[in-house]
Image: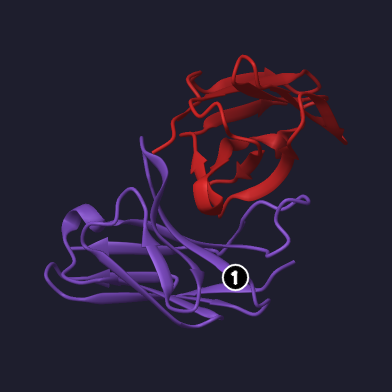
Amino acid sequence: DAGITQSPRHKVTETGTPVTLRCHQTENHRYMYWYRQDPGHGLRLIHYSYGVKDTDKGEVSDGYSVSRSKTEDFLLTLESATSSQTSVYFCAIQGQSFGANYGYTFGSGTRLTVV
Amino acid sequence: QKEVEQNSGPLSVPEGAIASLNCTYSDRGSQSFFWYRQYSGKSPELIMFIYSNGDKEDGRFTAQLNKASQYVSLLIRDSQPSDSATYLCAVIYGNNRLAFGKGNQVVVIP
């Protein structure tokens, strides 16, 4: 299995503060993704990356930014956290050989609470 | 945003019975389809993928794809209590992005 870790696992932060979540992979996969999961909405794509310094917006990107300066790390930043960003955040990776039989592999998630 | 619909509510099935889950998608050009299982408090786990029309079997799971009707389904045979989870349908669209349905909860009753 691909190695993918997210940090932190849990975080409580105050409204208006910046927050950065980290996703780290050890398999040299090109594609990486950030999703949020909320009751009633399912998994929604925030941002994704198709290579170092190559990122693009997903469907719910407002209030979020990302950076990928190394293949193995994909950072998600909440520039000024709001209560509506309380959610579970998942990072996912996809192998370069997609098309054979691979979907995404997900990290364990980060539970973020904005108070 | 591509639409992936999983409309049925929680599904309760007796142990040993067949659980049937359905999913429809909006992008007629979609080629790749996935089913994920997610236990409460855990991350989604890929259990099935299908690319071609027809059935694909893997153990107790069968995925069925009908591109003309734009639906994909998942059958779980001989359901076990360990199958109690939320099942997410996902469809690939542009630039290798996955769109997910909201999921269906399955409860297997011993």
Q: Residue A57 or B60: which is nearer the viewer?
A: A57
Q: Which chain is purple?
A: A
> Is residue A77 visible to us here?
yes
Q: Which chain is red?
A: B
Residue A28, image x, y percentages: 65, 77
Tell me if residue B62 comes above or below residue A92 in the rendering.
Answer: above
Q: In this view, does A88 lie to the left or right of B87?
A: left
Where the N terminus of chain A falls, by quadrant? bottom right
Tell me if residue A49 comes above or below residue B41 in the rendering.
Answer: below
Q: Which residue is drawn at 44% across and 35% down?
A: B2
Q: What element carries label 1?
A: loop
Tell me if residue A44 comes above or below residue A78 in the rendering.
Answer: above
Q: Which chain letter matches label 1?
A: A
Q: Which residue is drawn at 44% across and 72% down?
A: A54
Amino acid found under the numbered disc labelled 1: Arg
Q: Name the residue under label 1.
A: A30
Residue count near mark 1 (Cα–Cα under 10 Å), binned few <14, some 14–19, many ≥20: some
Residue A56, image x, y percentages: 38, 62
Query: For residue A76, which quarter of the picture?
Result: bottom left
